[in-house]
Amino acid sequence: MKIVIIGAGSRSFGRGQVADIFQAKDLNRRDTVLCLVDSDSEALERMMKVAQRIREHMKSDIRLEWATDYRQALPGAKYVVIAVARKRYELWEQDFRVPLAHGFRHCLGENGGPGALFHALRSFELIIPICREVEKLCPDAFVLNFTNPEARVLHAISHLTRVKAAGFCHGFYGAHGAISRYLNQPSEQVEITSAGMNHFYCVLSVKEKSTGRELLPDVLRLAADDSSAPPLFRKIVQLFGIFTFPSDDHIGEYLAYGAEFHGTEWDYGLERRKIPLKAVPASSPVDEYAKGQRPVDDPEILCPSGELVVPVIGDIEFDRNRLHAAVNVINRDGYIDNLPRSGVVEVPGIVNASGIHPRPVGAIPEIFAVYSRTQYAIHELLTEAYRTSSKRLLLQALLLDPVVNNITSAEKMLDEMLDLQKDYLPSFS
C-alpha cells in the first residue's frame, strides 16, 4: 500500500501526517510505502530527516521514499494526500489587503470573501494538474485533500477531473471542544452531529451518550449567556439559535457583517505583532528535531496531528465501519436536503473497505442554507471561470460575494490582483 503526501515539506502539516503514519500500528503491518513529495528540496530534505528519526524510534517497517516531482511518486499510489501552496503568507496578505484597500471590508481573506477567489485560483492551478496526473498514473487512487479553500478546491476537483476525492478539515473540533467545555463533560461522553459547509456548519444535535438526552438547548443557552465567547459567534447563537464554528474570523468570511465583529486587521500581519529591538534567529521544533537537537521521542514532534486522514486510511484498509464527524464531499445524494446537489458539504460519514459513506442529516437551519447557497453559486462560477479562462465569469463570482458592493471597485481590484499575482494564477480573457 503506497501513500503519497504532496506538500510534505510543511513544518505543521507534514510533521503531523508523518507522525500519525509511523505511529499507526496497523499500517506498520501492511507492507506500507510512504512517499514524501515537495517541490522545495530543502523543505523535503528536512522532513525526510524528521521521518527517518521517527521511523527508527518507532522501529517501523514502513518503507520511506521521496521525490521533488509528484509524477515520479504517483505510480502505484493507493492514497494521495494533498496540502499545497506557494508563498502562502505573502500572497495571503495580498488577498486580504488589496480588497480592503478597494473598500471591501472582509475577514481573513482565506476561504470566503473576495480574497478567497484568488486563493482558490492559485490552489486550482496547483491541484488540477496533480489530479490530471493521478488520472493517468494511478487512476484508482483516493485523493484526500487538505488544501484550502476546502469547499472551492474540492468542487473544482470533483467537476473538472475524474479522480475519487474527499476533503478533510479539523474545524469541526472547534465546536466539539466548545460544547464539551460548556457542558463540563468529556467529548467522548456526548454525541455531536454537525453539518453544513466547511468552516460554516450548524450543530444539529448534542446527545448525552449514556441517556440519549438531547442537550443542544442547554448548549445554546450557555453559549448565548457567555460574554467571553467570540462576539459574532455569540450573536448568531442569540439571533438564529444556531451553534456554529466558534471562530469569528472563519464564519465572518461568509457574511456581509463579519468585519463588524471581527474587525479589519489581518490576523497574521504586523498590526498583530510586536517588533523586537533585536532580531531573534528563526528556528522551529521541526528544524531542531531534523538536526538531532531534540530527543528522538520528543512529544512535540510525535504528538498526533488531530487530522482524520490516517484514521480514514486505516478504516478503509481494515474495514472498520467507523463513523467520523466531518467529511467533505459533493452533496450528490442530498446528504443535506436544502443545499445544492453539486455543492461540497461537510457531514458525518461512515468509513469502511468500500470507502466513505456520507450520512444524510436532513435539512440544516434555512438561514444558514441561504447564506451557503450564495457561496455555492460562487463556487460554480469560479470553477467554470477557471475551466473556460473567462474573466467575465470571474467578475460575476466576485460580485456575488456579500461584501462586494461596488462594481467599479470590483473591476479595478480584479485587474490589480490578476496582475500582482500573474505568476501564480491562470490567465483570463
Image: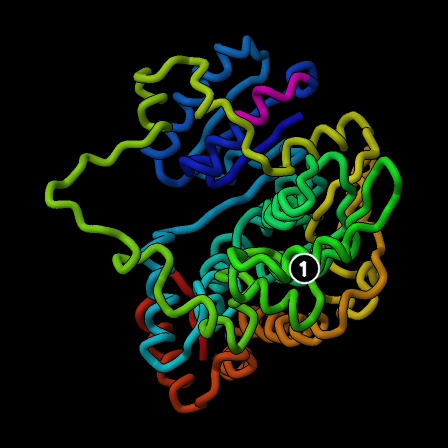
Residue 346 x %, y %:
70, 55
Whether residue 197 sits left or right of residue 64 in the image: it is: right
Residue 386 x %, y %:
54, 69
The residue at the point 47 percent across, 40 percent down is: 7
Chain part drawn in magenta: 19-25
Q: Residue furthest left?
A: 277
Hey, what amino acid is under mark 1?
Phe
Q: Residue furthest top?
A: 59
Whether residue 300 sits left or right of residue 358 in the image: it is: left
Quadrant in the picture for the N terminus? top right
The figure's colour scheme reads rainbow
Q: Which is nearer the eye, 229 or 403?
A: 229
Query: Magenta includes 20?
Result: yes
Kindly state the secondary structure of the residue where label 1 is placed: loop
Q: Which is nearer the eye, 393 or 308?
A: 308
Q: Which residue is mark 1?
A: 243
